[in-house]
Image (spheres, helix red, strand yellow):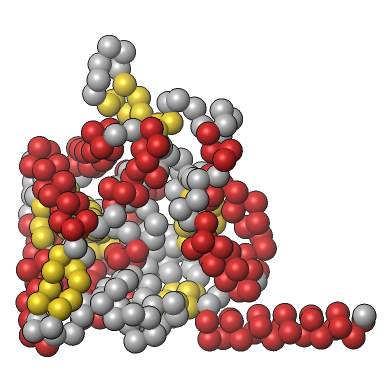
Amino acid sequence: MIRLAAIFLLLLAGTEIVLRQWVLTPSRQTFDPQLGFTYLGNQDILHTREGRARITLNSLGLNAPPLDTIHAAAQDRPTVLVLGDSYTEALQVPRETNFVSLAAQASGLNLVNAGRSGLGPLHYPEIFGQLRADIVPDALIICLTQGDIQDARRTPYRVVRTEGELSISGLSVTASTNSRLRGYIEPLIHHSALATLIMRRAALVLGGWQWPWEDWPFFDTPEIRSPGRRAGDDDVYSAIMFQLATLNSQIPTALLYIPTFRYAAGGVMIETAQSRRDRRAFETMAAELSLPLFQAGAAMRASYARDSFPLTGFDNATLGHGHLNERGHAAVAQTLAQAARAVADRP
């Protein structure tokens, strides 16, 4: 029995060493009551699920240069904060090849990547509030992608309405039940790559699962809107528009939509039906809010027409699916640079 236990421990130790060296690091995330799990500051991240990149996050947990570098660049050029989801955070490629870094070079502006995987428009005012004092941005760009509206339906949020009024006067988000439960094992996943891998695999299986206790009164209340279950599209759109308007009232803001394509022979790209629906919804929101909306689709189509190489996917995953590869980032960077110049010039 002792020998079996020793062999088991050696196998665990060996697995842990191999994972840390070639696959992934222990979780570098911490639990936030509003946002769920976000990265700790000053962490080295090894990402191999799609592509391969080792990235050092800055003190704010962002895939961006150190704060001293950001502040030094701000002395002679406007600072533009770029919010978005995992497409923007871009842990799949080296930092210098992601679209925020490339757009910063092309525009001559101080662009700061504040992308956060798994988050969306309902979370962005909270993220902006947490970062504003440290970054001190002059303008803001929000990168939108297919799935942002669907994610909003699954995001628990609380709306405040003035008595007798239908319009929203306040909105706050809270972490999902799954994230709150994962928070209990946070110390374990901080110290073990194996535990982190197991949790990530479990999250893939259970990510869409609605736990039976999510509707119990002490987990949720009628004021908490989990739109996939209790609110229609009008509620979701109103909530997203309220958050976008809130940000635009605090800082000059522009939107950038990154479409999702499927690929065909002969340099043909076909935007997915869901991407088209989301794009049209954001076009309507932008028009109603008088927000500039930039579209990355044309630059992405031009890139694929040149060499017929998909802009998403990696050799160690599936080409044509998943996150942007380096070609995709280069294409999106062209539109982001235009958006950055335009929003930085707004009064």
Specify the quadrant of the image occupied by residue 95.
bottom left
Kindly indicate the quadrant of the structure image that contains residue 196. bottom right
Q: Tell me where residue 340 appears, x and y as whole percent.
A: 13, 61
Badge count: 0
In the image, taking residue 51 as reference, residue 331 lies left or right, namely: left
Residue at 60% across / 68% down in the picture? 198
- Residue 237, position as x, y percentages in the image: 23, 38
Q: Where 75 falls versus 252 (above or below)?
A: below
Residue in view at x 11 percent, y 43 percent: 284
* Image position of 325 with respect to 113: above or below: below
Q: Which of 259 and 273 is in front in this view?
A: 273
Q: Position of residue 200 (x, y in %)?
A: 53, 66
Name the residue nearer the viewer: 328 or 343.
328
Q: Which residue is most to the top?
A: 164
> Could you tell whether 247 is left or right of 298 in the image?
right
Q: Residue at x 22, y 56 (%)?
A: 274
Vertically, is 165 above or below 340?
A: above
Picture residue at 25% right of the left edge, 20% below the top = 166
Whether residue 315 is visible to the viewer of this picture, yes or no, is: yes
Look at the image and tell me whether residue 336 can be seen. no
Residue 1, x across and y down, in percent: 92, 80
